[in-house]
Amino acid sequence: MQALIMVVVILAVLGGVLWFTQRRQKINESALAQLAQSQGWQYQKSYELSQLGSGNVLRYRLSQGSREDGAWSLDIESGSAGSGAGGSPLQNTTWRSEDVKLPEGLVLIGPRPKDMPVNFDLGSILMQAALKVLLHMSLGNEAPDAAHLHEVKQGSPDLLRQYLVFTTDEGLPRRLMTADAERALLDLTQSLKEKQRPAVVFWTQGLQVKCAGLITDAPNLKRIATLGGALKTAWSDN
């Protein structure tokens, strides 16, 4: 029973991998445009059908670069889970880049539940099922098999107190989480609400930093971009 409860907690808390429902939030579009201009980023607003089923997605995109010089995008998305005015909003803020990719394997870094026992067995069948759901929520139908994921204890004590690190190869997070990348992750974590803490996914399709909810203030959007850039640089330089 304890294992089942802990898996439910992890599914609810393990980061920006999961979308969560909250009140609709008014977006200051002029502030986003001004931020983009001040940073040399592009800004775009779009409205499209949701890939989750019925409903629509309103997206504010900040981006930089092109495929040739290492592009990334930072999407602030609010998607209705159902049609009509009664559809509840599903909201997240996601930084993505396809400029760096793993030829094979996977790294998943997500917030550690506050009351999670240090000696909890993360190799259980239930945990594998939880990881599979997390990956599907983050990556959709393209999510890879989670069967070979296992927890590794890599990083500073501060990082390990706040985050869980899963991988198919323990050499991957060691290369990805440099001191600069870890510092950027912890800086962002400190500035966000607990339920908004980021999760990092690195796999064959690219690199992703995902926060639950709408992050719209300029300082935290810059922190997310800084974290994504630090992760990209870490992988490219090592």
Image (cartoon, rainbow, N blue to C red):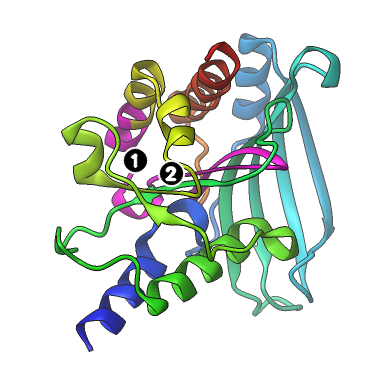
- Residue type, mark 2 in image: Pro
Please state if 215 lies on the left or on the right of 44 as rendered: left
Task: Please name the residue shown 48% across and 75% down the image.
Answer: 129
In the image, which residues are magenta? 186-212
Q: Above or below — where is 19 with respect to 55? A: above
Indicate whether 21 appears above or below 227: below
Reading the image, the residue beneath label 1 is: 192
**Rendering coords of residue 24 (x, y %):** 55, 60
Task: Name the residue: 76% across, 78% down.
Answer: 83
At x 50%, y 61%, the residue is 18
Q: Name the amino acid, label 1.
A: Leu
The number of numbered badges drawn on the structure is 2
User: Is residue 74 or residue 87 the one in the foreground?
Assistant: 74
Q: Quadrant of residue 182?
A: top left
Please provide percent x and percent y for residue 59.
72, 46
Label 2 to label 1, Cα distance in Å?
9 Å
Q: Which mark is residue 198?
A: 2
Marks 2 and 1 in Cβ contact (< 8 Å) = yes
Tell me if 39 is positioned left or right of 230 in this view. Answer: right
Q: Does residue 204 appear to the left or right of 92 in the view shown?
A: right
| SS at badge 2 | loop
